[in-house]
Amino acid sequence: MHAIVCIKQVPDTTEVSINPETGTLIREGVPSIINPFDTYAIEEALLWREKFGGRVTVVSMGPPQAEDALREAIAMGADEAILLSDRAFAGADTLATAYTLAEAIRRIGDYDLVICGRQAIDGDTGQVGPGIANRLGIPQLTYVSKIRQVDFETSTITVERLVEEGCEVVVSTLPAVITVNKDINQPRYPDFKGVMRSRGVEIPVWDAGMLEGADPAQFGLDGSPTRVVRVFTPPPRQEEAEIIEADTVEEAAALLAERLLAEEVIRNQVFS
């Protein structure tokens, strides 16, 4: 079994601030982490490797510092990692990102599963995983909360998907792209042996020229039909709170109902 996991390094959301003049995120000096949903994707790949054998390859597109995220994935147990880093990839929206990752996966080849986190916490689009599947021309299974079975003899996978109506069981052919929720597992912490191994692993860096056959016009900003014009923090709400004091819960509820009726927040209706 060969599972390819796509991860992203994102700013720690508790530390993000916005430049008031440019309206862009201030990334300098801000700690970065593996996108939390992607840690579940890494863990799921490791669990299935432990069951069937094989290998886990982790891929990330980003600046040179994204190597830190890949080393953390190796410390968790991934076998190898590849960093896609080139100025040509800069400014990519989800469409261009999915294209670049798909071209890298084509170059890696010989895979059974491509696993992604449900979405990245800095963009929250959930579009890259499906975009990769579309580019590769293989099935996509999104919002996966459990992989029930992987059958390599019949080249099928059975998963449970969380949908608005409840749980949906889907059977698909392999290879396939799946995006996972937090319900699927509990990511492991890197142990000392894994951390030491990650420090010595050489992580290859692939630039645009190494993706043979790819269309350079579909990379980065040139391949992105969307543009981020401005990022800003919504102004804080100016609200006042009033505490209704009463001797009993029933009395407080009655006073609240009277106030809501008076303010026409609710209306008194008589049903026959």
Image (spheres, grey):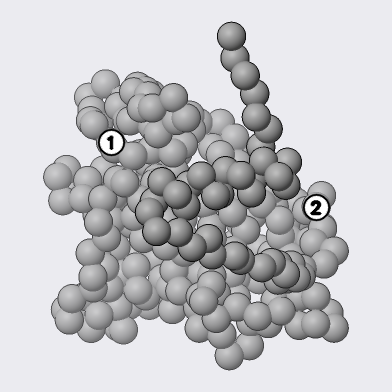
Specify the quadrant that holds the C terminus.
top right
Q: Residue 147: give its label.
A: 1
Q: Position of residue 169 (x, y in %)?
A: 34, 23
Q: Residues within 10 Å of mark 1 (few under 14, many from 20)?
A: some
Do callouts 1 and 2 mark residues in contact (Cβ within 8 Å)? Answer: no
Mark 1: which amino acid?
A: Ile
Sequence-earlier tag: 1 or 2:
1
Question: Image quadrant of residue 110?
Answer: top left
Q: Is residue 243 positioned above or below 253 on the image? A: below
In x, y percent, where is residue 26?
A: 68, 82
What residue is drawn where x is 66% and y is 68%?
240
Q: Residue at x 59, y 54 (%)?
A: 124
Tell me residue 35's x, y (percent). 47, 64
Q: Does 219 appear above or below 1?
A: below
Q: Which residue is mark 2?
A: 226
Q: Secondary structure at mark 1?
A: strand
Q: Is residue 155 left or right of residue 210?
A: left
Residue toward you, 121 or 48: 121
Is residue 229 something one can see in this rendering? yes
Query: In the image, 232: left or right of 196?
Result: right
Instruction: Check disc 2 and give the amino acid type.
Output: Thr
Residue that appears at 44% across and 24% down: 165
Query: Quadrant where the N terminus lies?
Result: top left
